[in-house]
Image (cartoon, rainbow, N blue to C red):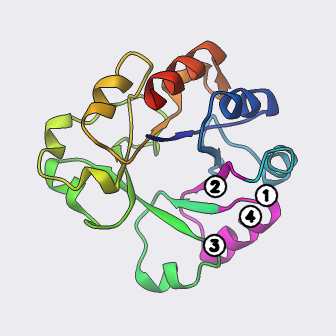
Amino acid sequence: MWVKICGITNLEDARCAIDAQADALGFVFYPKSPRYICPEEAQAIAQMLPLHVQKIGLFVDVTPEEINLTCQQARMDTAQIHFDVDDAFLGALHVPYVRVVRAKNPSDVMRYEGLIRLVDAYVDDYGGAGKRIDLSWFENADRKNIILAGGLSPENIEHVKALGFYGADVSSGVEKSKGIKDHAKIRAFLQKAKA
């Protein structure tokens, strides 16, 4: 199972996640988030990381130009688009991207069917709230194309993995406090996800 540890704010947490076999690290470029990191700080961390680990920047309500510039500055490999955009917006991006579905009801999980996408529980403040989606919503979904986010933890990842999702994206479920990771929880989460 592909795993992203999101809301990275320091090198120690990044290194713990990598040592535990995380596939990707998420950096939040949304100033209203308690996990916000400025591009300069993200770049200082990213340049210390191995090339095989994907660096993903999370964006809310910005222009394609801002995404391109921030990804270049901060050495991000991919942009995670946490708001509704059109095809022209996506066409203006110079970096690979992943679309996010903020699911309010069961039909939402079918948006962008056939594409790799991240599906998160809808919350007003754009994620990191630990809110879970009802897993029954995914009964008829193409789970092999879905990265599941929202309310994941070392306690429930084995159940989620058994349902055949492509990947898992965790933030608050492996934290001591907002923006500070619990290394024991990171290791437990990844051990179970990768078993």
Question: In the image, what residue type sits under mark 2?
Answer: Gly
Image point (44%, 29%), residue name: 193
41 left or right of 62 in image? right
Q: What residue is at 23 percent from the left and 47 percent from the top?
A: 104
Numbered range of the magenta stretch? 52-77
Is the Cβ of the residue at disc 1 closer than 8 Å to that at disc 4? yes
> Quadrant location of the N terminus?
top left
The residue tagged with tag 4: helix, strand or loop? helix
> Do tag 1 and tag 2 residues touch (Cβ < 8 Å)?
yes
Is residue 70 within the magenta segment? yes
At horizontal 79% and vertical 58% (from top left) the residue drawn is: 74
Q: Residues at badges 2 and 4 in contact (C-beta under 8 Å)?
A: yes
Task: Locate residue 47 relative to residue 93 in the image: left or right.
Answer: right
Q: How many marks?
A: 4
Q: Secondary structure at mark 2?
A: strand
Residue hosting label 2: 57
